[in-house]
Amino acid sequence: MKRFKVVAGWVSGLAAAVFLLMYGLYRYVFCFPPEKRPDVRSIPNSRLYRQHRTRMLEIVEKMEQGPYEEVSVLSQDGLRLYGKLYYIKKGAPIVIFCHGYHGTAAWDGYGFFRACMENGINILMTDQRAHGKSQGRVITFGIMERYDCKTWSEYAMERFGTWTDVFLAGVSMGAASVIMSSELGLPRNVRGLMADCGYSRPAAIIMETVKSMGLPVKPVYLLLKYGARLFGSFNLEAATGLEAAQKLNIPVLFFHGGQDTIVPLSMGKELYQSCAGTRRWVTIENADHANSAMTDYKTYETAVLQFMEKCLEEKENQFSRTP
């Protein structure tokens, strides 16, 4: 009996340790409370941003000075989400932009914002849930963010009308969210998707990150997976970009940095190759993660403008063929 109690005590202690470890990992990876969110002008002095900080600050100042309209929507699970609408030209298309994990629209949206501002295209720079001014404390790597993409696209349709051309664009987690949103039934006036350095599956990018940290991949991933279910009430494997891409009937423009150290180039190409519809791939050879536009803006801008023009031409062709 005494031996049984000792064993039971050890099992209980181990279970408690695993539970605490699971909760700690969940908090570290998925939780992003308001007090931890960065000011847009406080650009990290990291290898990703160091050489681009001056240009980034210039764009940040333009974004902050506006003019813009602060807008908001209510997510399907009751969170108030915010964005900044830069309405440049009546009747022009509108790009809805989604940033990445722990990022801001001002940092990640450099290329799309600049291309839109300089070419008379309207753009809505959104704060992802649990980022910026938007409500929420839990980041779900695109699982819930994909519904937010749909909500923003519906907002654009309701506000500007069904004849307004809408494009969804994203960087990193934002790109994955945009791709995954496509299987939710987007409004008909969404003409194209633009995905910069997106990952193929939420599970895949988490395992890749765990591996890069030198930690045991499968045990840590399982702790995160079940921590997400237990504490965050979401399933990391509920959706993937690969599955969504296989059903796509909307044109997609893919960007990826040739030197991406966070989302491997191979992961982006896997997503591209799974895409069922019209697609285009652009590699920015010397770019690291999320800085393709800052590395080679001219190539980036040209690809964006040509892609949007092609999508709009295809729309006109479809209408001309309609009896």
Image (cartoon, rainbow, N blue to C red):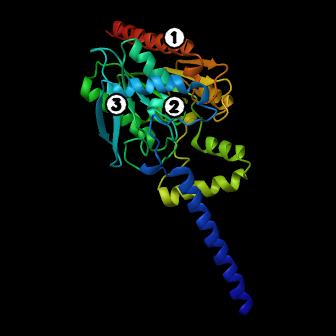
Task: In this rendered view, identify the residue nearer to me: 252 or 260.
Answer: 260
Mark number for residue 175? 2
Q: Is residue 230 above or below residue 297?
A: below
The x, y position of residue 222, in whole percent, is 64, 55
Residue drawn at x 25%, y 27% is 159
Q: Quadrant of the C terminus?
A: top left
Question: Mark 2: few, some, or many residues within 10 Å (few <14, many ≥20)?
Answer: many
Quarter occupied by residue 254 = top right
Q: Could you say whether the residue bearing mark 1 is in a helix, strand or loop?
A: helix
The x, y position of residue 78, in whole percent, is 32, 49
Tell whether label 3 touches label 2 (CB within 8 Å): no
Label 3 or label 1, whichever lies nearer to me, is: 3
Given the image, on which type of amino acid does mark 2 rest?
A: Ala
The x, y position of residue 189, in whole percent, is 35, 22
Q: Could you say whether the residue bearing mark 3 is in a helix, strand or loop?
A: strand
Mark number for residue 84? 3
Given the image, on which type of amino acid does mark 3 rest?
A: Lys
Instruction: For marks 2 and 1, give the CA distance.
Output: 19 Å
